[in-house]
Amino acid sequence: MKKTLITCSSILSLMLAGQALAQTDSNWQLSRTIDGHPDFQGVWENNTITPVERPDVFGDKQILTDEDVAFLQRRIIEITAESSDALFGEGVLEAAFSGEVNSYDPSTGNYDQQWMAERTVHRRTSQITDPPNGKFPPLTEQAIAMGRDQAQRREDHPADSYTDRSLGERCLSFGAPRLGSGYNSYWQIVQTRDTVAIIQEMAHDVRIIPMVDKPHIDESIKLWHGDSRGYWEGDTLVVETRNFNGLTETFPGFGSSENKHLIEKFTRVSQGRIDYEFTIDDPSTFTDKVVGL
């Protein structure tokens, strides 16, 4: 089976005193740590309305026009003013175009807008950039069968024990990287000479990334967020992660396997912006056929 590469890009914007700093500054100079590497330290947010997968309404359209952006900004203001329901992550674009804001959690009652941060309109219609259609590739037969078995198990045994409930419901893990936006979507980055730590607000997950030249742990050892190693490509921080336990999700509705291989790149491009990219190679979960889901 051929390997599948899923390449995504996103933006993390530094928040200071509750206000987003400008993403471009002609006088800005890259700050560095005492050992000369780029300084990523701080609290960064991902409050974009750009979904991971491209909504069908956009077809093959990759970039929003000025008219699209103006429409979205107007609709977000209208929906926020008219409804008490919260505009969570993937639902923002759908609500803007359909005019319907659906409850995030109808079983326990709605979240209202006070739970949400102000959203940022970016011009991309999906975070996925390859495949070009902005969609995840089809699942493998193995992944489909596993998902079907899990769904059946939850239907037959919804709450025989705590293990029957999802990891997210139990607040154990939301996977890595966590791409959800607009709700607990903040990352704190801390650097030392030999280590980078990334603290995800959602579930308070902490990823410890050694920046030293040493091999990955033995293949028999599997971890929730995998075993990471970091290195520098010029001023870009590259993080390579393997040894996942296969129990977390790549994204809600899309699981992962122990064969998942994750590469992330962080490049600070201004005072208030980090360009972030990641590539997922998981041949046990995704096929190499590029089609819309």
Image (spheres, rainbow, N blue to C red):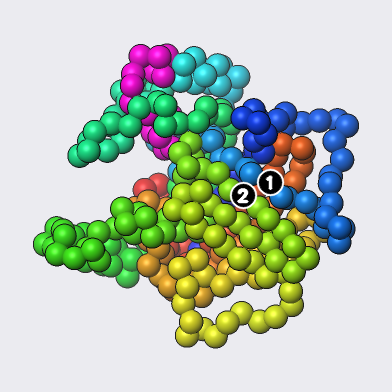
Height in image: 225 above or below 70? below
Q: Which residue is rendered at x = 50% and y = 66% of the image?
A: 225
Tell me where residue 66 appears, x and y as whole percent: 60, 19
Please give the range of residues in magenta: 78-94
Question: Is residue 104 shown left or right of residue 189?
Answer: left
Q: Which residue is mark 1?
A: 42
Question: Is residue 152 shown left or right of residue 37?
Answer: left
Give yes or no for contact between labels 2 and 1 (Cβ–Cβ under 8 Å).
yes
Height in image: 232 above or below 28? below
Quadrant (top left/top right/bottom left/bottom right) for the N terminus = bottom left
Q: Amino acid at mark 2?
A: Gln
As drawn, the residue found furthest toward the front would be 17
Q: Residues within 10 Å of mark 1 (few under 14, many from 20)?
A: few
Tell me where residue 122 appears, x and y as whole percent: 58, 31
Nearer the observer, 74 or 107: 107
Q: Which residue is mark 2?
A: 188
Residues at marks 2 and 1, CA–CA distance in whole angstroms:
6 Å
Question: Is residue 128 shown left or right of residue 277?
Answer: left
Question: Is residue 254 shown left or right of residue 219?
Answer: left
